[in-house]
Image: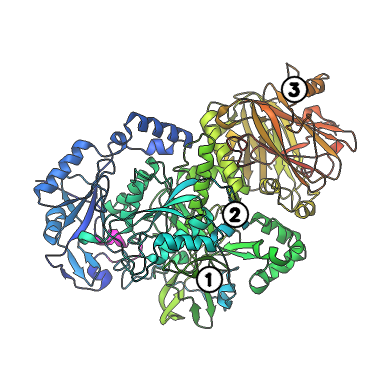
Amino acid sequence: MARVTLTNSTYLDLTSYHTTTATTVAEAYQIQGAPVPSDMTLNVALILPRANDPTALLQSNWATRQTTLQQLEDNGTLWSTYGADPAAYAAAQAELTALGIPLLGNAAGSDGYISSVESRTIWVQLTPQHFTDLFGKTLYGAGAYLQYWEGELSLPDTIGATGIWFDSQPLWGTYPATPNDLSRGAAVHPTDGPLSIGNALLAAGRESSAYAGEMANWFYNFPLTGIDVPTATVGLVESGTGDVMQPGLTRTFQEALNLFRERAGLSTPGDYYVVANNGQDYTEPMGNPGERTLDVAVVTSANPNSTMGLYAGSGFGNHATSNSVTAYQAAFWDQVNNPAVVSSSFGIFQQAAPGSPFASAIRELFIDAALRNISVFVANNDWGSSYNFTNGIANQNIVLSSAYAVMVGGTSITTLAAAPHDHTVEALYGLAVAGDLATLWQLMEGGLMTLPSGVAGSEAVRTLLIEAVWNTYAISGHTIDPAIDDVGAGDGGVDVTQPTPSYQTAFGLTPTSVNHSPWGGTGRGAPDVAADAGGNMWYTTPQTNMLGLAVADGTSAATPMWASLVAQIDTIFEDQGLPNLGYMNDLLYIAAAIAPASFNDVTFGNNVTSYRLGGHIDSDGTAITLTGFGYEAGAGYDLTSGLGTPNGTLLARALTAIAHSQMSFGTSPDMLDADGGGWQSGADQSLMFQAMSASGAAIDIGLGAGGFDFGTNASGAYAWTNRLAQQSLQSDFDPNLVRLFDKQAQGWIGQSVVASGQDVSVSINGGSAQAIQGTLSSPFGFADFVSDDGAVRVARAVAVAETAGGADDQIAVVRVRQNGENDLSLIFYRVDDLAGTIDGKRPGHEAYAAAADARAYQLAQGGTSLGGPGYGNYEQAALVGVDAGDFIAMKLTNQTTGAFFWAFAHANEQVNSQSVGHLWNYGLNTWGWEDTYGGGDRDFNDLIVQLDFTSASGQGWLM
């Protein structure tokens, strides 16, 4: 029998990549282990390779993935394509049987394990002799939890496994006992006080708390709040615990769950099931009832109409230890309950080396979830940039940082009521109440919806002021509190063991570690998103035993919060005839590119907590030195909060629009097509060229062999952005905030009719500008060309009616926010092409106005003219009779002055021999108008207009 050595399969390759420079377990732990007793057993997973590589499928767009997976499922060939080769699987089983090794598990997981051709997994039970027979190594032990081997493992060549995992307790023996300082002696000495802004109420004992459902309503705008409809099933990874109750209690889990729901204001009983086929345990370290209780409390409160599945994993009979991987497998392969969303607050603490069979096992596990069409949310952990390693550098959970899971970070919410009591935000609060524009602008980017000076009483308790990175650590003299190895900050960073995912690259990101070589580099940035995790705002939960009330924190709360939101969006998808979101990471990044108001941008705080042992700071009796490695929040995506926290309804609208576009309009031309690093027009169309720069700039637009150029003034300090324009199109967005940011000029706008296939390029002050997110936004009618000197948005002036399911005779929702003082009205009319032609008449033709009037859409309330709602105000209306693929243009009339304006600059007046553009693109089917003849103050927010072609479909829950 020939044997194959497995590369990177030492014990330290399993546990300690990038955490120590030791090469042997004995050196790393300073131990001399002994062979484990002959009657000890260890349950091990052997994972075989896939019959075919699914990478190409998973790299395709969401609609292609969904369509292909459904076709394979319908044909009964999904797992013959992407599971193990049946013959190779049978040969491996035969070899294991010949070696006398007991096999565990079956496809149903009746003994707590999943072994199947589909999962490519064979669970086995190994005695020390079996371990030697199988892997060619002696199994050593030291202490209660550490079992290890020296050197690399090997396998009989007839087994062919490429992945290995152990069902063993993960919390002990993971970290090297004498870790190396990899920071090269780095040291920082923070002044007394919190390490980060917006978390100080905890130390003062004045933190707030709320039920998850209240947070979902007050801060995160969940789309189905108050709508009584069953929502998609949420699976919860609850390793070892399931629904077990504290010994001696007579109350059942169901009774305790119902009691908590009553306290949270829910009159109906909770619905759950448990998958715990081999036992569960209440006591740590076997079970983790506190984690279970927190997860359940968040989901049942934030998303009360979902069934919850509790997955305990392999249990504790027959030498099982309910390692969280077994709970993941139980959830992913539950083909009875089929949870649409799986949330895990459990870490996998081993830092497995890239290229190791251990890293392969976990990587392929999450690919299984993607192929099963499950959305997976994973907590990005709770120790800040250190990840609780004492090596002095920034560490990211490299095993769990799957590109096919959504990594969730943590924030701290400070309300208007709480802000005066947190000295780190007190000054911001004062400026916000005083109406300071710079402060309010940054706070609005983070989700502020109401002018703070107008909020009083009980409303202040539920009104967001600031959301910062969750980081509760603080220095007092020579003491840090909480202790640095206690949870207290959101992790975040870069997994340099894998390439940057395509969705992050397309977003324009190159996530880069703060560590120096050889521990630095680029890779998968984490987290992807975030939500409240504690600090100044905790979660109201049951006590650990599910009785009474308590408060809890952690990304372990933020993660089921996100899972709850996506369960609601899955329900909306089903209502609109769409499949579940499943693997959805790319859709989140597309949504952030085209509809940034889908996320609240967290721009305050940091997660800098990295440390090494020894020094002058006392951490609960341990001397440490802070080293300063970590990450800061900033505008847009960052490595502390990802894309930000959700505006649930706006995110649901964006995701449904993206999904329908990909599903039903995949053949529609993009605005621009990428061509070998350049761009070409995707159709004959009228394009706007919007200049955005902090100072005056010379803009050159290349169009084939020709083009044009123009100069632009600087954009106003508070010129409206995609985010603000889209935020303002919410009925509860404060009109006072809208009016406060009036008369902020945009740059110059040019416009030209461009032929299909014509090259399009932009330079600013002579330097080439790059459309870094162009592949994400161009299918939705715009692309930003960016350089160090500013940006130029290239955008269509016409909307394309990408209706739900490609259906005709639909309702299009119209949302308008007025920020001009004149009386305004608007008509929407159908044109024949993207250049605005009607029956051969181009904009500007003497008969064009009559043709537009004849093509005007009827409003649901009657007539064709939509009046502006008044200065600062909001209104929603609807167009009827909209067909799939309709090209829709607009005409604005200033009723006060009698002037009217088209979306096409060449049909408008001229100033200095240049046609005046009156329309500005603000992202996904959103535009702003300038209502004054000659260009006025060029703020392009006198009337903000959004066309929404999908929200009225189904039950209309997103209207």
Residue 50 lies left or right of residue 599; in this view the side is left
Amino acid at circle 3 = Arg
The residue under label 3 is 855
Q: Residues within 10 Å of mark 3 (few under 14, many from 20)?
A: some
Q: Position of residue 634 (x, y in %)?
A: 59, 58
**Residue under numbered circle 1:** 472
Q: Nearer the viewer, residue 762 or 373?
A: 373
N-terminal-most mark, 1 or 2: 2
What are the residue bounds of the magenta stretch? 11-22
The span from disc 1 to disc 2 (Cα, nearest Å) is: 22 Å
Give the foreground label among 1 and 2: 2
User: Quarter of the image holding residue 429?
Assistant: bottom right
Q: Callout 2, which amino acid? A: Tyr
Decide if residue 530 is on the left or right side of residue 1.
right
336 shown above or below 259: above
| Residue 512, image x, y percentages | 48, 55
Q: Residue at label 2?
A: 220
Three-letter amino acid code of the residue under disc 1: Thr
Question: 47 above or below 516?
Answer: above
Front residue of 787 and 279: 279
Assess whether mark 3 and mark 1 are in contact (beta carbons under 8 angstroms): no
Q: Sequence order check: which comes first, mark 1 or mark 3?
A: 1
Q: Can residue 42 be seen in this snapshot?
A: yes
CA distance separating discs 2 and 3 = 40 Å
- Residue 526, given in percent of the width and then of the height, sits at 47, 55
Q: Is residue 14 magenta?
A: yes
Seen at 48% across and 63% down, the residue is: 259
Left of 132 or right of it: where is 610? right
From the viewer's side, name the closer residue of 353 and 63.
Answer: 63
Mark 2 neighbour class, 10 Å CA radius: few under 14, some 14 to 19, many 20 or more: many
Circle 2 SS class: loop
